[in-house]
């Protein structure tokens, strides 16, 4: 299997996971385009997909329109998640 084929398979997996998240939350790509980049539901979707499907920061930033990948990395870090206390 070529690197291109592997990349296509990964991208399709990430897209399926994002589609499922939109369905679960009742949100859409249009909502992602119009909502602020740091709104809670976007962060929650990004965190969950990052940890469960290993979606890259760049893909998350582009697809959810969260700005520059490095800027969004901070709130997706497990250290930025709310404490269970």
Image: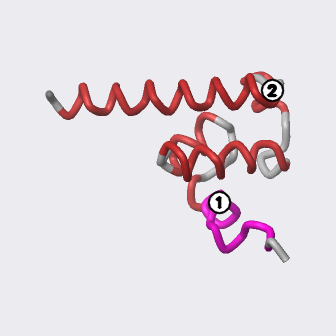
> For this rendering, which residue is in front, 15 or 48?
48
Crowding near the residue tagged with mark 2, few <14, some 14–19, many ≥20 C-alpha atoms within 10 Å: some
Rendering coords of residue 64 (x, y %): 67, 37
Residue under the point 80% across and 71% down: 84
Mark pair 1, 2: CA separation: 19 Å
Secondary element at image label 1 = helix
Badges 1 and 2: C-beta atoms under 8 Å apart?
Answer: no
Identify the mark at residue 76; answer none if there is no mark: 1
Left or right position of 30 against 64:
right
Residue positioned 34% across, 26% down in the render:
8
- Classify 10 Å Cα crowding around label 1: few (below 14), some (14-19), many (20 and above): some
Q: Quick check: is 30 in the magenta stretch?
A: no
- Say whether residue 40 is left or right of residue 44: right
- Give the residue at x 81% y 31%: 25
First in sequence: mark 1 or mark 2? 2
Q: Secondary structure at mark 2?
A: loop
Above/below status of 60 relative to 63: below
**Which segment did they paint magenta?**
71-83
Q: In which image quadrant can residue 71 be found?
A: bottom right
Which of the 4 quarters of the picture holds residue 75?
bottom right
Residue drawn where x is 84% and y is 49% of the image: 40
- Quickly name the residue at label 2: 27
In this view, the residue in front, 69 or 5, is 5
- Percent x, y of residue 42: 76, 43
């Amino acid at each position: 299997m070529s690197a291109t084929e592997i990349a296509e398979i990964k991208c399709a997996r990430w897209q399926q996971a994002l589609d499922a998240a939109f369905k679960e939350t009742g949100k859409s790509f249009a909502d992602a385009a119009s909502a602020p980049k740091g709104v809670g539901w976007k962060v929650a979707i990004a965190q969950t997909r990052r940890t469960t499907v290993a979606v890259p920061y760049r893909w998350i930033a582009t697809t959810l329109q969260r700005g520059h990948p490095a800027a969004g990395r901070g709130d997706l870090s497990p250290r930025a998640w709310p404490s269970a206390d």
